[in-house]
Amino acid sequence: MSEPMAPLSACRLGLDTHQEPTIYLRHDSPVCRSEGFSALSRVMVRTERKHLIATLNMVTSNLLMPGEIGFSESAWKRMELREGNSVWLSHPKPVQSLSYLRAKVFGSELSQEQLREIIDDIVAGRYADVHLAAFITACASDKLSIREITDLTRAMVDSGSQIEWGLPQVVDKHCVGGLPGNRTTPIIVSILAAAGLTMPKTSSRAITSPAGTADTMETLTNVSLSLEQMRSVVEQEGGCLAWGGSVRLSPSDDLLIQVERALDIDSEGQLIASVLSKKIAAGATHVVIDIPVGETAKVRSQESAQALADNFKAVASTLGLTVHTLLTDGSQPIGRGIGPALEARDILSVLQNKKDMPTDLRQRAAEVAGAMLDLINDLPEGEGYKQALRILESGAAWEKFQAICKAQGGLKTPPIAPYRYELIAQKTGIVDQINNRKLAKVAKLAGAPADLAAGVDMHCKLGDKIDLNQPLLTIHAESSGELSYAVDYLEDHSDIIHIIAGREPS
Amino acid sequence: MSEPMAPLSACRLGLDTHQEPTIYLRHDSPVCRSEGFSALSRVMVRTERKHLIATLNMVTSNLLMPGEIGFSESAWKRMELREGNSVWLSHPKPVQSLSYLRAKVFGSELSQEQLREIIDDIVAGRYADVHLAAFITACASDKLSIREITDLTRAMVDSGSQIEWGLPQVVDKHCVGGLPGNRTTPIIVSILAAAGLTMPKTSSRAITSPAGTADTMETLTNVSLSLEQMRSVVEQEGGCLAWGGSVRLSPSDDLLIQVERALDIDSEGQLIASVLSKKIAAGATHVVIDIPVGETAKVRSQESAQALADNFKAVASTLGLTVHTLLTDGSQPIGRGIGPALEARDILSVLQNKKDMPTDLRQRAAEVAGAMLDLINDLPEGEGYKQALRILESGAAWEKFQAICKAQGGLKTPPIAPYRYELIAQKTGIVDQINNRKLAKVAKLAGAPADLAAGVDMHCKLGDKIDLNQPLLTIHAESSGELSYAVDYLEDHSDIIHIIAGREPS
């Protein structure tokens, strides 16, 4: 019944539409007429070797010749095309799992099989960005049960690569985030690998924050490791600091995170599934989860932190993972820098035992590393913390960090931003509140994390006595446009660092 | 601090990205560097006269010369550009209402002012499609309170044009849909306008169904009326049959509907706000709402129909609108045709009192028109129904319909589809179930509503005795690809028309 159509000729338009594969057809193209395609239609695209579902944009000009089909960069790469390749188009089969998504929107609990189909379809590129947005929204807040989060986690693990280490103990850590500058991971990996543990750390890029560990480590070394490279680094050094996206552990998570970032929505169920799926896929057996609690941190109260900790443990135990949670102080930024390169600088100064190092960053890293040493070696509480400090002081952690970076491709010097703005205290007093969220926003407006050198450098802590005209923070930016945008925001939000009248110096 | 940038030169790329305004910049463009823009950034675009927020796609080829900026068709038109116009780019201010959207995702109830800001930002184009998807999902199911639906309705009314008629009574009707072929509106408008009432009817296009009244009427006359044209048609004839989108009544609704269609999600709160905002903006005082109830209709039970009716009335009464609801039989399609042109054919045969007209369509139209006559003239129940039938029988409704179409630009003949497929009964028996949803899906796969002639023509009703090889339905399509796609689905879902063994003819 359907007449076979002549193939179209592939044409690389050089249009970067980010992740959503997009194709371009002339509006007068016979295939549009015959198949009834219009702008935003979802279309099945096939070559002799590959196929994918793409979103259609129409061309009403002469960008394309008759018989040509244009491809966005992401579609071109996924299809592994060459100029002039033959391409056939058809209607995609209806995506069955979208009906499960709709059921979730209307309050249904999804079965293991339904969640698996959704994740498989996401990984196969069958969801447009609006579908991902609906899925994220439908799962946000408390809309996933523990059973659903567990099944979602399992589906996310199974959708990507998994690493088997053949070891009884493989350790990992995660910080729930929301605390600017809390970049303990590279220090913890260095301590624990130096202590002889195996810690194949993969980290994500920032979702809604000014930097993720992968962003920060990117200023220090290569983080885009293949699975084989990662295995080789870990076998050699006991630890690595890789970007999770490039090893395709839990690939659906990488797609969801893109849209979560656009929506600026971070939901608890997705968070737990995202974190645990990456740990399980990376082969971890023991995980410490750091949950900073503070009025302007991601988790705002002890109660909600405890509830989150309980949910993490409930899901992890069903999946055979030992999780220890640490509720930590989230009232102010950790370290001084906020943004990839500025945080990298703080990390180096802690590892190198520099005199002016941020001691709070050192302490936080030693606490988390210590909790893992207590857990693995069954030590009396606090013993691991002392061990961790000794490993830092001895220089063994710094040695290990250098060895890991060398194995990953070499240690680099973090970039420095050319544009700066210093915020000066308008009055004398005591710092009594620091707004983490607004501070993160300033760093993001300044360009972090995409601009690695951009961010905020803090010059004060809670309780500090401040003199008139004392510098409170410095904004770093790679462009003047971003600098002025961040400064505008800062000027509109003078409460970011709140100073109350204190005792005058006597 | 920010250096003024040289303007970019506007270039019409002829790319149709549908509603989302999109701009294109070379990846090596200085403005990307200076402002830190990357693919999918939301960018404020300004000329000397206009501005809007657009989504950025990057160009990695020579599609654009250095110094040029490309525009999608929707962005080009909204900016009223000419080739070579000067364009400046900057970061948009953060869209404050997106934080209300996030609060809604996490279960907050939104205030009147917050809903108003959301709707205003949607109309101003400040929401990307993923934001619209999140808003629709966050409001779906029962997640909006009656107060929120009321405030949402008011905000939607205020965001667009409004018509004042200066009359004590202006009538309107709405059918909640979900019932294929239930195209009573053109008949009802003809009856009520012939009865001397004022009925300035605006209709939407299909959201998730194979045809909306605007799609069907488009096969019979011009439905893209300006507000002035609409006023003139109604002043002359007492009624009109216009597409709501072109008069910009409740323009946010038109944007939301695009994404609802992509998601295939129709939520109750959005539904009530969508319907009532259009009625109020069109100046209606009395509205009859037809709610078909059936296992495979949009509303599946008497209880949920009654709840929906109550919610419609609660919201309407706060907004000063008199609403009468009718719960009707939604167990099977009404009329014979499903799809714009096929439904238009049924409408004409009812208005023309043709012998072979679908009597169920005629009866349903007379019931709804009758309910309005009862309401307005305070008649004993059922009296209006008899009046409505008399107006149809006398030919007065047909006269009025022709006059309205003439005033709107002339009566057209609906198109006929070139590709057909007839489904033949495989056994003898009685039709005991018809699946409205799957039938609608077949009509959509065949190309409806975008292809006006496409759809399904039914040859049987519930309870009909069927002989072996008797035709059950005919699929109509404008292209062979769509026909085969619809046939594939039909073959996979043989339960669409369910036949049980009945008495053999004696």
Image (cartoon, coloured by chain):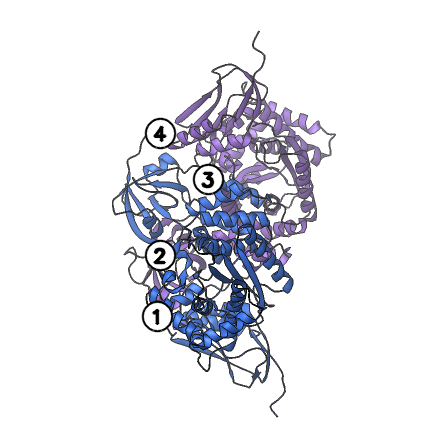
Chain colours: A blue, B purple
How crowded is the residue under tag 4: few (<14 C-alpha within 10 Å), some, or many (20+)? few
> Could you say whether the residue bearing mark 3 is in a helix, strand or loop?
loop
Marks 1,4: beta carbons within 8 A: no
Please report, as a chain letter, where disc 1 is located. Answer: A
Up the image or down, B477 lies above or below A212; here it is: above
Q: Dot 1: what SS?
A: loop
Please tell me which of labels 2 and 4 falls first in the chain. 4
Q: CA distance from mark 1 to mark 3?
A: 46 Å
Please tell me whether mark 3 or mark 2 is closer to you in this view.
2
Query: Residue beneath label 2, please?
Result: A226
Give amino acid for label 2.
Answer: Ser
Q: Earlier in the sequence, mark 1 or mark 4?
A: 4
Task: Report, in whole angstroms, how far the alpha carbon at label 3 lies from the one at label 2.
Answer: 31 Å
Q: Nearer the viewer, residue B41 or A329?
A: A329
Which residue carries the number 4 mark?
A2
Question: Is tag 1's residue or tag 3's residue first in the polypeptide sequence?
Answer: 3
Circle 3 packing at 10 Å, graded few (<14), some (14-19), many (20+), is: few
Q: Is residue B232 above or below residue B427?
A: below
Q: Amino acid at mark 4?
A: Ser
Disc 2 crowd rating (10 Å Cα; few below 14, some 14-19, many 20+) is: some
Q: Which residue is mark 3?
A: A95
Q: Is B16 located above or below residue A380 in the figure? A: above
The amino acid pointed to by label 1 is: Leu
